[in-house]
Structures are given as C-alpha cells and as structure tokens.
Image (cartoon, rainbow, N blue to C red):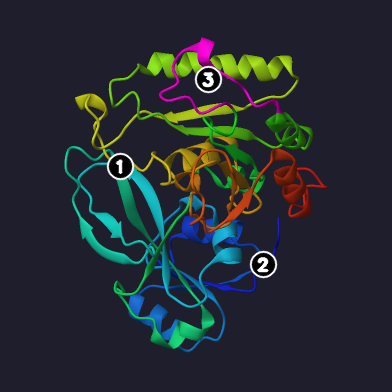
Amino acid sequence: METNYFFQIVAVSNCASKRFINYLEEMFSGSKIHCFSEGEEAVKFINDSSIDTLYFSRENFTAFDFKSLIKNGNKKNFSTILQIKVNGDEEFVQLDKNFLIVNKTVMDGKTLDGYVESGIYFIPQELNSLFKINLFEGVIGIPLPVYSSSVEYFKSRPALFLDRDGVINKDVAYLHEVKDIVIFDAIIPVIKFFNDKKLPVVVLTNQSGVARGKFLESDVLKVNQHIFNYFIKKKVFIDRFYSCPYMESGEIEAYAKKTLNRKPSPGMLFQACGDFFIKLDGSFMIGDKISDAIDVLGLTNISIQRNYDLAGAQHHVFSSESEILAYIKAHCDYSAGP
C-alpha cells in the first residue's frame, strides 16, 4: 500500500485514547497526524494549514475506502464521508442530485436504510481557511464502502461489477423461468480477463418483479444459479450475485420499501466491497441502462448499447463486449495482480 498520500490527518480525541491514535497511524502510515482535545483547536490548526486534510471530528474506527476518497475526492468543496446503515433511531442525511447535503431526517417505516454522517471530513487545501465547526451547508456527502477491519482495507483490490439482464443475458420482461434465459457468450472474455487476474466478478441486479408480484425471490435464485452453472461449464466464474427485490411503489407490501440497495444507489455495490475486500478505484461497472451506473468515487461506469436509450449517459458507451474489454485493458493496471 502507498505510504504517503500527501495530506495530513487532524483528529479531535482525548489524547489518552492510545487505541485511536494507533488506528490512525495504522490506516495512514506516512501521513502527518495531529491530535487535539477540543474541536476549536483542531479547526484553528486546519485554518492555518496549507495541505489537504482529513478531519476526524470524533473518534471513528470504521475502515472506509479512504484510498478512493483521497485519490478522487472533490477539490472544490468540503465533503464528508457517509455510511449506509439500516433504518433505526438515528438521523439520516438527505442528498440532492449533486450529492450536496440538504437536510437530516428520521426515516419512516417504509425505508429500509439510509446514509448517516461519519464525522470525517475531507478538506482541500484551498478551503482550509474557510472550514468551521458544525459545517453543514454546501458540504458534499461522499458514500463509501466499509470494511470490517483494517486488514481487509489493506487487502482490497479492484473488481468487475456486472448488471444481469441486458448485459449477461437477453433482457426478457420479468425474466423468472430458466427456459427463457439467453446468455450472451460475448461477455465471457470480459469475465475471464478478471478471473485470470484473480479479481472478483460480481453481479448486481435490480429485480423489482418480486415487489410487483410478478415472481418470487426463489425464481431469481433459480435464474442466477442457471447462469452461474452455465459459466462454470464455459470455464469462467461469477463470485456472487446480489439481487434487490424491493421497489418503493411495489404491490407486495413486504417488498414495497425504499432502499439504497436498488441501483443506481450503491447499497449492493458496497455490500460486495465489504464481502470481497474490493476497492472502488480501478473497478468497473457494466450495465445496459443509465440507471445501472452507480455514481461513487473511483468506480468507472460503462454501458453496452442494447435496447435502451443511452443518449444522456455521463459515462462511456460501447456497442460490443470486445470494445469494452479493449477499453478495460487500456485503462487498468492489473499487471501485478491483486
């Protein structure tokens, strides 16, 4: 892992908390760490600094994907790391389309999860003098995946994420029967490229047909298993399928829920990152709809032109799997393996 990000760590902590200081030293080896007992002291220090700063307003031992934040973080705004949590008693952050934090609220019973603040801010050096305590207005919320430990964080590596219907197989309306599956063999070389590099290949699929009452979750599993088995026979491997059966306007009450697991939100993506030690930087997501693109730091979104209008896509669009593979090979650095 890199030992110098060319930024400093400023933390508000009881300096007797050796455990937290040890955590910071482990996570950010090579970076200068400054610890203060009061927020006002820390902010004054930041105001007088001339280097990018990662500010911990309180002790937080969560192992976020800090690599993606530091490498790809916004240099024109203050930003704060957001974490996805299951709906509980705490306040959740609301974001606008530009990821600016607009308010905080307690979610209702139809909402499964949401974003919560971490108390960790990224402050570009150009804005150090403007930073203040309890900053809220004009702050960009940065959702990041979480690892269960620093060990997993340091082991993280890139991955390939795939939509299912329209990318792996023909998009049949509410596909739920094995007999209707038509797999695109042209995707196999793309999967094989990542298999050969020993990098994870993960499928992320919205399956609102469950919430609409069109089929059952067990039908989704059957289709996924058939696709998995088919690829095994072709000597390529899918590490895992993640499926979201929820849709807020669904007809089946148990699945009529709002959730960040439904693309383009990053819930399934982040779950996979934690399960397989995946870092966003250097990872690719391939879809066939604009809503398949997940807008998070470090992830490269790609679309393949099938049946949907991609005119408004803010990412790369290709007409074939071979073009996609050529693009990935030209824009990745996996020569050293994971």
Res. 94 image quadrant: bottom left
For label 1, the crowd category at 10 Å Cα-Cα, with few meaning under 14, some 14 to 19 and many 20 or more, is many
If you read the primary sequence from the N terminus, does the residue marked by circle 1 or circle 2 appear first?
2
Residue 158 in picture, x, y percent from top left: 66, 45
Residue holding disc 1: 113
Dot 3 falls on a residue whose secondary structure is helix
242 or 32: which is nearer to us?
242
Q: How many marks?
A: 3
306 or 330: which is nearer to us?
306
Which quarter of the image is occupied by the N terminus? bottom right
Write down the region rendered in magenta.
169-185
Residue 255 in picture, x, y percent from top left: 27, 28
Residue holding disc 3: 224
Type of amino acid at the residue the image marks with label 3: Asn
**3 or 2: mark nearer the eye:** 3
184 inside magenta stretch: yes
Q: Which mark is residue 30?
A: 2
Type of amino acid at the residue the image marks with label 1: Asp
If you read the primary sequence from the N terminus, does the residue marked by circle 3 or circle 2 appear first?
2
Task: Report, in whole angstroms, how far the alpha carbon at label 3 lies from the one at label 2.
Answer: 44 Å
Badge 1 vs badge 2, beta-carbon distance below 8 Å: no
